[in-house]
Amino acid sequence: MATLRTTPRLLSSSLPTLRPSTARSYATVEPIRKLGVALSATQPPVSEKHSPTINDPSKGENPKTKTFHVYRWSPERPSEKPKMQSYTLDLNKTGPMMLDALIRIKNEVDPTLTFRRSCREGICGSCAMNIDGVNTLACLCRIPTNTQHESRVYPLPHTYVVKDLVPDLTQFYKQYKSIKPYLQRETKSEDGREIRQSPEERKKLDGLYECILCACCSTSCPSYWWNSEQYLGPAVLLQSYRWLADSRDEHKAERKAALDNNMSLYRCHTILNCSRTCPKGLNPGKAIAEIKKAMAFS
C-alpha cells in the first residue's frame, strides 16, 4: 500500500516540528499516537525555484500564459522531499476553473500529476484542495485572470498525502461514521407511509443537509489540526446537528450523550475559519454553537 506523507503547515507555528519515526499506510485507522508519527509536516516542500518549469506544449499565436505551482510528492519515491512543480498554461486554451487547469496539465503536460475529481459541479466534494491559501473546491474556484499572479495549489492542510494533491481522509470518514449519520427511530408512522414534517420543521434543516463532506472546513480549523484524533471537527459536528435538528429523529438524547465530553465538541474555540472557507456557503460555526446551546439547556 502507498506510504503517506503529511502536508506542510500553511501557517507558521511556535511549536517545534517533529520528525515521523514510522511510515503510515493508506487506509490506516489506528490512532496516530500508536504509530509514533507527527500530525504536521517535518519540513515545507522544496521551492519551485529548484525544479524546472514545464511549459504548455500547445500555446497559441497570442498566448495568455499563466504559471501554476503545484505540490508534488510520490509514494514511489518516499525518500524524496515534496516539491513545488511549476507549469505554464495558455489561458486561451484552458477552461475558467482551477480544475480545468489541473485536468489540462494532466492530459497535455504531465500525466503523472494525481488529484481527485468527479462531478465538476461542486456536488461530490472530491476536488477539495488548498488554492492560493484557501481551502476550496477546484471545480468552483476561478482561475485569476491576472497572468502576473502565480497560483499555488496544495493538498488540504494537515492531512496525510496519498500522492500529490490526494489527501487521506480515512480518519475524517471514521469520525463521520461515529455520529451515526442516519435517522434513528422506533415509532412507525400511523398510516405506514413516510414520516412527515411541517414546513417549519423542514426549514430547520436548511444550511445543514447541503454539506458535501469535502473536509475544507475541518482542515482549515486549528483545533482540528492539533486534536483530530478526538475533536470531531466542523464538518462532522454540522452533520451531527443536522440529526439533532431533525424532528423525526428519536435518539437525540443518545446523540447528545456521545458529545458530552471535553474533546468531541468543546475543542471548538469559535475561530470560524470553517464558516469563512466553506465552498457551499454553509455555517458550521453556527451549527456547533447550536449544539452547545442544546447541551446547556438539556
Image: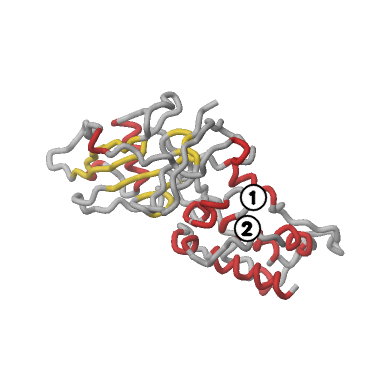
**Residue at (42, 29) in percent of width and height:** 74
Q: Image height check: is 29 above or below 80?
A: below
Q: Which badge, 1 or 2, comes first in the chain's sequence?
A: 1
Residue 55, disc: none
The quadrant of the picture occupied by the N terminus is top right
Q: Is residue 118 shown above or below 199?
A: above
Q: What residue type is disc 1 on?
A: Tyr
> x and y percent of residue 289 in the render?
60, 69
What residue type is disc 2 on?
Gln
Crowdedness of circle 1 by 10 Å Cα count: few (<14), some, many (20+)? some
Along the viewing direction, whichever of 16 and 123 lies nearer the viewer: 16
Q: Give the residue displayed 57% in from the left and 50% down from the top.
A: 228
Q: Residues within 10 Å of mark 2 (few under 14, many from 20)?
A: many
| Residue 219 point in image, percent of width and height | 49, 51
| Foreground of the two, 28 or 173 | 28
Q: Which residue is mark 2?
A: 239
Q: Which mark is residue 176?
A: 1
Left or right: 10 in relation to 220:
left
| Picture quarter with the C terminus | bottom right
- Helix, strand or loop for disc 1: helix
* Quarter of image, res 233: bottom right
